[in-house]
Image (cartoon, rainbow, N blue to C red):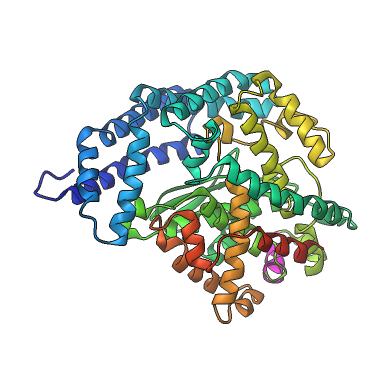
Amino acid sequence: MSSGESNAYQKLVELSTELQLLKNTQALLGWDQEVLLPKKGVAYRGQQMSWLSGYLHREFTSEKVGDWIAEAESTAATPEENANLREWRHEYDRATKVPVELVQRFAETQVRAKAVWAEAREKSDFSRFAPELQNLIDLSREQAECWGYEGCLYDALLDTYERGMTCERLDETLGGLRDDLVPLVEEACNREPFDQSKLEGDYPVEQQKALNRLIAEDIGFDFEAGRIDTAVHPFCSGMSPFDTRLTTRYDESDFRSSLFGVLHEAGHGMYEQGLREDWHGQPIGQAVSLGIHESQSRLWENQVGRSRAFWEKWLPVAAEHFPHLANLSVDEMFEAVNQASKSFIRVEADEVTYDLHILLRYEMEKEIFAGNLSLQDIPGEWNRRFEEYFGLKVDKDSNGCLQDIHWSMAIFGYFPTYSLGNINAAHLAAAAKADEPGLSSQLEKADYSGLLRWMRKNVHENGSVYLPDDLIQKATGTSADPAHLVAHLRERYL
C-alpha cells in the first residue's frame, strides 16, 4: 500500500490491488492441491491457507479501511467508483463481523476436508467424510450467524454467491421451473433411446486431451493465458485474466465426459479471460456472481456444445482422433449428446434432467441449515429424494451424496447458481441472437467469434459494475425469464 498523498479512494484501490495478489496466490495453491499436491503436503497446505486467509482478513478489516470507505463514499463521482465502493462496503461490513480465528480455522479445515472427500469418494464411503462435513457445516453456521440474516440462516450463505438471493426468491424461481420441467423430463425421457453401443470403443486419454484442446481453442479459450489439467472433479481456477486454469477428468470408454467438462470450464475460463485487465485488483474487475458465471459455462457446454452445427464441424475431427466414430452420422451424434435419461451423476446429466439434480441439492442444504436434517441421515435422505425425482435407487455413495466436491469446500449455497446459470444462459443466448445481426447464421456454421464478442461486450467486460439482476437487464433489456430455458429445452429435446 502506498504511503503517498493519495485520497481515500486511491488508498482503497492500492490496498485492494495488493491484497488481490495474495488472493491470486491463494487460488494458485488451491489449484495445486487439486492437481499436483502430494498427499503428505495436505496438512502443510492447510497451514499456508490458514495464514494467508488470516492475513487477508486482518488487512482488510482494519479500522483505517472502514474510515477510507466512509470518506470515499462521500466523494465518489463515477459509476465505476460507486460500484467499487458498493462492493468494498458490502465485503467490509460482512468481514468485520467475523473473527480472524474463525476465518483461519475455516481455511485449514477446508484443505483437509477436500483431501478426505477425495478418498471417501474413491472408496464410496460417506462415513469417512462425515466428521469433516460436520465440521464444515458447524463452521458455516457460525459464520452465517456472524454475518446475520433477515429470513433464514441459509440466506446468508446464498448471498455469498448471488447477491440479494434468498430462499423466498429461489423457491419461487426454481419452483416454477420445476413445474415446467417435470412433465418435460417425462416426455423427453420416454422418447426412443439412442443406441449407446454405437459409441462403444476405446478413447485414449492423450487423444481426448488433443481433441479437447483443439475445441477449447476454437471457441475462444486463450492457451497463452491458461491451461487444462486433470482433477477428481472438474473446475476452473481464474487467478487473473492472464492465468486461468481448467481441469477435467477422463473416461476411456466415453470421450464426452471430458469434452463437456472442458466446454463447461472453458466457459468459466473465457469469462475470466474477458474481464478488463486495467480493472484487475479492484472489485469491478471481478465476475459479479456465480449465477452469471454459470451462465457462461452452461452456455458453452449446452447451447453450443450440444448443437447440431457444433457436431457438423467437430464429428469429422473427433473421428480422426477416434476412428470408430467415423461410423456415426451427424444426426446420430447430435442424438447421442442430447439423449434425455435419468442418471446418477450431475456433471454428466443432460440438459433436461440437470436442474432436478440442483433442486435436490438445494432442498437438502436448506434442510441441513434449518436443523431438520442430521449428518447421519444425509445419505439415506439423499437416496430417498433421488428415487423420488429420478426413479432410480442409488447404488453407492459415490453415485449419491459424495459425487460433488462442493460440500468439501464448504460452498453451501452454490448449487442453486447452476440453475440460475441455466436460466441466464438461455436468456442471454436469445438476446444475443436478437441483438447481433448475422449471429444466427454464424452459429449455423459453428463460428463462435460473434457470440464471444457479444458476451465480452455485454457480460465479461462489465465485471461487477452492475449487480446480477441489473447486468441481465442491461444486457438483454428484460429480467431473466425461465421461459427462454424451457423453450430451448422443448425445441432441442421434443
**Which residue appears farthest toward the left when viewing the image?**
5
Which quadrant holds residue 334?
A: bottom right
**Quadrant location of the N terminus in the rendered image:** top left
Q: Is residue 36 left or right of residue 422?
A: left
Point out residue 238 in the picture as x, y percentages from the top left corner.
44, 49
Nearer to the camera, 225 or 154: 154
The residue positioned 65% from the left and 54% from the top of the image is: 260
Q: Residue at x 60, y 67 (%)?
A: 429
Asked if the magenta segment contains residue 125, the reply would be no
Whether 314 is among the magenta residues is: yes
**Picture quadrant where residue 439 is located:** bottom right
- Compared with 446, 27 (above or below) is above
Q: Position of residue 151 (x, y in %)?
A: 53, 35
Q: Is residue 249 visible?
A: no
Image vertical order of residue 253 relative to residue 52, above or below: below
Relative vertical location of residue 434 with respect to residue 4 in this rendering, above or below = below
Between residue 244 and residue 370, name the one nearer to us: 370
Q: Going by the image, does 67 lie left or right of 381?
A: left
Left or right: residue 225 compared with residue 376: left
Q: Position of residue 392 (x, y in %)?
A: 83, 37
Taking the spot 80% from the left edge, 68% from the top edge, the residue there is 331
- Residue at the limit of the structure toward the front, as seen here: 150
- The quadrant of the rendering that contains the C terminus is bottom right
Q: Position of residue 230 (x, y in %)?
A: 57, 43
What kind of secondary structure does the magenta stretch mostly adopt?
A: helix
In the image, which residues are magenta? 310-321
Count of labels shown? 0
Q: Which residue appears at 73% of the width and 52% of the height?
A: 350
Is residue 386 something one can see in this rendering?
yes
Judged left or right of residue 332, residue 128 is left
**Residue 351 occupies which quadrant of the picture?**
bottom right
